[in-house]
Every structure is written in structure tokens, then in C-alpha cells.
Image: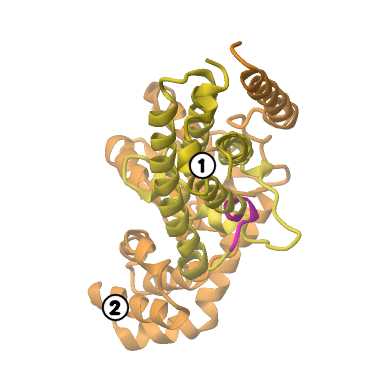
Amino acid sequence: MRPKLANRLVFVFALLGAGISAYLTAAHLNPALLTCGPIVQGCDEVAAHATSRGFGIAGLESVPTAAFGLLMYLWVAALSFVRVASAALDRIARLLQAATAVAAVGVSAWLTYLEAFVIRAWCQWCIASAALTVLILLAIALERPERAGELAESHT
Amino acid sequence: MKSGEVKLFAAILVVAIILVAVALVPMLTARDPRKPAPPPRGLTGEELAPPSARSLGNPKARYTLVEFGDYQCGLCKTAHDRSKGWIKKYGDRLRYVFYFYAAVTHLHSRSMARAAEAAAEQGKYWEMHNLLFQNAPTMSKLSPKEGDELIMKLAAKLKLDMIKFRAALQGPSTDKAVTAGEDLAVRAGVQSTPHFFIVTPDGKIDRLQFLDNVEQWLKDPTKFK
């Protein structure tokens, strides 16, 4: 995949993820906002589980887990922007994106495992977010390395 | 802007911000999420927290803090941990009453509530209540059968008469007690947990609803002396 296309996809996926995370963060502040369905109906159960607040870590309960997702997606989107805005930072920004995406897929896999085997309920928003982290990682991984300087060259 | 690509990204970003603002701002401004719903109608303070209700703190306190909570709700566990501090600090001038209510269905919630009621028949409601919250994270990983086994272990830990405890768990009295709390929650308009009320000395009910509001209310202990 050409770097330009890969970076555009990563940017759009990250913004979509940020939108979902922002919604879930808002829903934690006001649970009445949380809507589920039509395919799955377990959002309330997932949202009520300890891991939906600060990953279930003591001391972090006041911060919704979705807020960490929001920060992650905004960080990835910002790095995409850096890649097109600065030739010098293209390579390091891509590396940071790749590292973030690997960590995000790992965390999403753990949260999905919790949905499947611990909470035994599914939330469509969490599934969508997990899918987006995978798509971001795929777009980064499928970018052709030999064309990695293309973005920077195009505007210098 | 250095290139068309930067312009494209900026345009996508602006569209995304507009979309998020259009979707989220009306949702968040529709109702202040920290602002509690109005007090319940057709329910008196005497009904919500009768003198006979199980309580912690000072049973003769002028103000009663009533909580509706669920043993398998994460925020309810946080509330439980904090309630210990409230009772320690203000227990001489505050009465605390807890009712079980599950706003959403959890696998073990109701059997945990029944276990607390069964322990109450041997005078160990609060001890079981504490153990249930302590073990809630473990419980959420267990199957129904494993959950029942853990409840038995907790009962044994409290040195309950296991024959009586088992009979109470399966008997109608625990179910009736749990249902009474749930009915009260419905009458009080509880739709999420934890959910808090204050019963004032004149028998009025003040809905605090959220955990943050309780902590705010407790910040001025002079008002509930």
C-alpha cells in the first residue's frame, strides 16, 4: 500500500475511533446516553464492569477506560498529521504510530477477551473500537517500506 | 499549509470535529449529568428508611443516607469502599442504609443479594455484605456454579451455621427480602447504581443520586449535626 493511502486510512480510522471513544466517555459521565443494539445488547453490562473504569486498576477508577482510548486515537491522528506536515519527522512518527497500534491492539484484545469470557456480554462500540485498532495496525503494516519517504518528499 | 495533503487532512479534521460536536454537544448539554433527578413522588422518608431498616452508623441520627447498590457493579464497589470512610468519619451523626438493586442484569448479583439476606438471618448481614463486595471482582470471573461455591466459602468464613444458611438461601424469606428492596428502588425511581438519597429530619427525601454528590454533601458536616 502506498504511504499516502496508508496514512490517509490511518488518519480516518483514528478519527472514527476518537468519535466512538468520545461517545463512550460521555456515556460514562451520563449512563443514560449509552445506547446498544440492534445486534448486541450488552453495553450496560460491559459499562458496569470494573474494567470500564481505569482498566479496573485501583486509583484510576475515576477515569473511564474509553478516555484512554480517546487519547490514543487522537495521538495516532496527530502523528498522521505530523507525517504529512513534516518530512523530518515522518519516519519517527510512523514508528510511534506502529508502536501505539501494537499496544492498542493488545489492550483491545484483552478487553474483547473480558467481554467474551468474563463479563459474557458484548458492546458494539467496544467491538467497533477493537476492529479500528486492528485496521490501523494493518494499514501501518501494509505500507510499503521502500516508499516510506513519499509523504515527506511530496511537499518539500 | 505546505501541501494539498495537509489541506486534505485539515479538511477531514474539521469535518470530524463538526460531526462530533453535532452528535455529542446536544447529548451532553441536554441534562447536567451531575444534576440528580427530582425527588421521588409518593414515597416518604419513613418508607424509604424506616427505623427498623438495617443500618450502620448512629441508628438515632437525624439524617439517613440511603444507598441502592449492586454487588456486581464496579462503581458500587467504589461506593462501598468509600462508604466505610464516611461511616468511620461521620457515623456518630449519620445513619447509613443499603438496599440491593441491580439496574442491569449481572450473572451473580441476585444470588449475592440473597446470600446477604441469608446471612442476616444469623445476624451477619453487614459482614457478608462486606465480603461480597470484597470478592465481587473474583465473582465476576466465575460460572454460576463456581459463584455459588464461593458464596458457601464466604459463609463458612463467617462461621455461619451452614445448614441454616443453605436453607435460608433456598427459602422464600431471602427472596422476599431482596424483592422488597427492589420494589422500593422502583418506587424511588432508581435507574442506575449506585444511587443515593438523604432522608432529612422532617422525613423528606433528597435525591443525591451520584457518588460525587454524596461526597459534596458530606463536605459540610455542620448541616447534618
Q: SS for tag 1?
A: helix
Chain represented in orange: B
Chain represented in yellow: A
Residue at 42%, 51% (x, y): give it: A107
Residue B79 visible in rendering: no
- Which segment did they paint magenta? A122-127
Crowding near the residue tagged with mark 2, few <14, some 14–19, many ≥20 C-alpha atoms within 10 Å: few
The outermost residue toward the front is A146
Q: Left or right: B94 with respect to A85? A: left
Identify the residue position indicated by label 1 in the image. A66
Query: Which amino acid type is marked by label 2?
Result: Lys
Residue A133 to residue B113: above or below: above
- Front residue (pair A102, B41): A102
Residue A81 in which image quadrant:
top right
In percent of width and height, residue B113 lies at 47, 67
Chain letter, disc 1 residue: A
- Front residue (pair A46, B16): B16
Q: SS for tag 2?
A: helix
Discs 2 and 1 share one subunit: no
Identify the residue position indicated by label 2 in the image. B153
Residue B16 to residue A61: above or below: above
Q: Left or right: B195 with respect to B86? A: right
